[in-house]
Amino acid sequence: MRWLVIFLLSFIDAHCAPRILVTIPPLHSITCSIMAGVAVPELMLTGHESPHHFALKPSHIKKISQADLVFWIGPELENFLIKPLNIYNKQNLALIGLPALNKKLVRYGCDHHEAHSKSWDPHIWLDLNNAIIICQTIAQKLIDMDPDHQIQYQENALALIAQIKKKQIDWAAHKSTTAQNYISFHDAYQYIESDLNRHNVGVIKNDEQGSMSLKKLNQLQDSITQQHVTAIFSEPQNTTKLIDQLAKQHHLCHRELDPLGANLTPGPHLYLKLVQQIYQAFNSCNKKQVSANAL
């Protein structure tokens, strides 16, 4: 009987917690960590689905309609959410709007070298300082909605922040002393570049492009040669033979970067694994290895 009472109380406790819907795996992972022991937030997209070109299904609409609160990056990433959030008048938090964040402008627009001065790069979660601010903000929003679990939210957030800060210390201790240029499938990594001493000088595809024109391909080839590019990165969500061709032709180190966690299990551990894998992929392409690959 005692165990039955405990079970029922725990069920009621979880049932009374707010229903949280989160759009992408990295943000969902942070929210999972903060809500640990209280409830499990629901994830809308898997890491295999690009939020840049996502189309809502009836099942997604149902999730939105049933949620008490929706966490998302913002219209720069999940443009598909604007209409349903308005229709259902859903309480939501677009994290890219936080004034304390380090935000960077989109570097590549329709033209390879054209920056959109009014558009923010939405990949804010890859900046570890931003991740800390996101943790603090999500925790406070949950406390405002669910003050009965204030202590759990606060303790969980502090524990995650401590892990993120440890990651920052580790990265600083192993930061490359030599700056290196790279090419990627799309420009998602500028928030992490300063921590790794890397710089993107070209993309295979941006969010407004179709197939790459011959002119843009020639520009990219010139960038690789003139700017001494040493590495090229693909993504699990996007595969292209062109990346393989460029890697072989120019003797580039080729690795995969996973900004959404497509190959990771959703949950509280995904975020730190995701940023660690990106860090390792970049650092595995150092100049010594590239020189060895070219021989």
Image (cartoon, grey):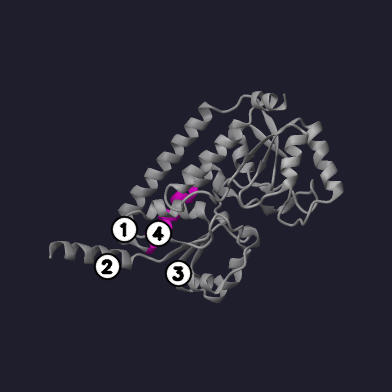
What is the chief secondary structure element of the magenta stretch?
A: helix
Tag 4 residue: 142
The numbered mark, 3 or 4, whose residue comes first in the sequence reads: 3
Q: Position of residue 53 (x, y in %)?
A: 65, 61
Q: Position of residue 105 (x, y in %)?
A: 68, 48
Q: Marks 1 and 4: in contact by CB < 8 Å?
A: yes
- Measured Cα–Cα span from mark 2 to mark 3: 18 Å
The numbered mark, 3 or 1, whose residue comes first in the sequence reads: 3
Tag 3 residue: 67
Quick one: quadrant of the C terminus?
Answer: top right
Residue furthest bottom as drawn: 87
Dividing the picture into quadrants, the one containing residue 147 is bottom left
Residue drawn at x 35%, y 60% is 39
- Measured Cα–Cα span from mark 2 to mark 1: 13 Å
- Please give the count of numbered marks on the rendered protein: 4
Task: Identify the amino acid type marked 2.
Answer: Ile
Tag 2 residue: 12
Q: Which mark is residue 149?
A: 1
Residue neighbourhood size for the residue with mark 2, other residues' Cα within 10 Å, grouped as few (<14), some (14–19), many (≥20):
few
Look at the image and give the residue range highlighted in magenta.
133-145
